[in-house]
Image (tube, rainbow, N blue to C red):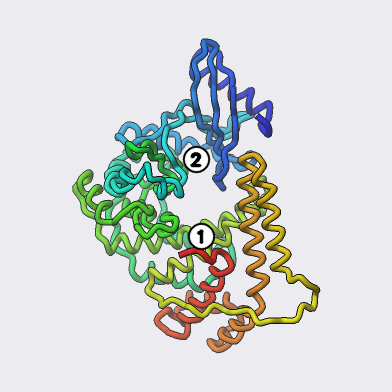
Amino acid sequence: MGGVSGELKDELTKRLSSVLDGSWTLRRIERLTGGASRETWAITAVSATGDTRELILRRDPPGREDARRIAMEAASFDEAARIGVPVPDVIDRSGDEPHPGIGAYLVMSKVPGEALPQKLLRDENLAEVRAALPYELGRILARIHRMDIEAVPNLPEHDPLTSLFDEYLTNGNPVPTLEAAFAWLLRNRPPATGKAFVHGDFRNGNLLVDAEGVRGVLDWELAHVGDPMEDLGWLCTRTWRFGSPHPVGGFGSRDDLFRGYADESGESPDPEVLHWWEVYGSLRWAVICRMQAAAAATGGDNTLELLAIGRRVAECEHDLLDLLDVPPHDETETPPATPQFLGAPPVEELLGAVREFVLEVGAGADAKTRYRSRVAAHVLGIAAREALFAPAVRETYRVRLAGLGYRSEAELALGVRAGRDHLDDLQVAEVIRGLAANRLKVANPKYR
């Protein structure tokens, strides 16, 4: 149990002994990798009579507790179970205030199944269930949208586009692609299809799946009142396909998703409305990436991961420009051969060697260190590619931006916001697509 404070272990032991009845001890408590905004811990609890329970602890990082949101999430699990959505049982939860020694938290039963997207999409043992998932997910979403809003305290309600723009403004500089996406969403916004409970993060990665199907829907921390089509659009956002060509979480077709939703709810989703929500979903993920990068300033043991997530905005730009039918840009800049004024070998070669060393050291470490070493290696790869391409890109786009009458990309973004420039202007579109393409070449050249 290295890395676990004595206070956390002691307080959890007391709470579990209280809610499970009898005397329980913790044989194992281990923090799991992943999760940029909330900690997840695996717990094995053993009773005095020899019974064993496998549990999951979810809690806010110390110093960033939000007890009201945790309470909302716990109540969402309760209501979801009532309506027939597969979810873990909530065993214990904090109250209106963080619990001394544990914080704002909930403890759930451990549900069988696989959540790692790469395994879900590639494991041959799950091939049969994969084909059936879009239909099943449609039915599950229809049930979620029947959940009783009044049964869940502190459930937020807001205008999705307005609140997203407000978050965008407070996290980072203006970006032309994102400005163009906001403008398109505002011009093409469809009427609301309804007012319902929205999961808010229903996607591949937050689903536990085994050969029998979906065993658990996880991570309800972003639940809110809104348009039910938001959940369907988020599920179909390209980010959550993890390289698969299939639009519904990488599993299958929208037609099967729509059929499942209609069979459960009696209402057939409109493909054009769903397209609007897919554009919104890609833009929302871009804003979340910016928020995560900004959160790194507060420190903590996941700072490196948060900073790395910030560079994923480039993937969102690529997706948004595809969704908005902007032609692809194949002419990413080729770095010229330049004298090594600052010494040889060049910096990209040095960073590449450090990257290999970090991966080698991490390979023999514990799971948490292995995960961090992979994140560190990814960041070193970004730094090496930026060192290689930045000078040529900087000069090329200084000239191209000047041709549009701007001194910087931020000025172009504000021109798009003001309505002076549009993606239907070929020259503007080429500059915006070119900037995004070069950022993606640095951040994640394998992304498609």
93 vs 195, left or right, is right
What residue does disc 1 label?
Answer: 287
Residue plotted at (54% across, 45% down) = 35
Residue plotted at (64% across, 39% down) = 366
Q: Which mark is residue 310?
A: none
Residue plotted at (55% across, 13% down) = 23
| Label 2 Cα neighbours within 10 Å, binned few <14 / some 14-19 / many ≥20 | many
Mark 1 vs mark 2, CA separation in Å: 20 Å
Identity, as a three-letter code, of the amino acid under mark 2: Arg
Residue plotted at (54% across, 18% down) = 46
Where residue 252 sits in the image (x, y, percent)?
A: 31, 53
| Residue lying at the far front of the rendered structure | 124
Where residue 87 sits in the image (x, y, percent)?
A: 38, 35
Q: Earlier in the sequence, mark 1 or mark 2?
A: 2
Please state which of residues 215 and 409 is positioned toward the viewer in this rendering.
Answer: 215
Please state which of residues 222 and 135 is positioned toward the viewer in this rendering.
Answer: 135
Please say if the residues under marks 1 and 2 sit with CB atoms less than 8 Å apart. no
Looking at the image, can residue 96 be seen? no
- Label 2 sits on a secondary structure element that is helix
Please state which of residues 129 and 431 is positioned toward the viewer in this rendering.
Answer: 129
Can you say whether 337 is above or below 442 in the image? below
Residue 324: name its quadrant. Answer: bottom left
What residue does disc 2 label?
Answer: 69
Where residue 275 sits in the image (x, y, percent)?
A: 33, 63
Looking at the figure, which quarter contains the N terminus?
A: top right
Identity, as a three-letter code, of the amino acid under mark 1: Val
| Label 1 Cα neighbours within 10 Å, binned few <14 / some 14-19 / many ≥20 | many
Task: Say which of marks 1 and 2 sits in front.
Answer: 1
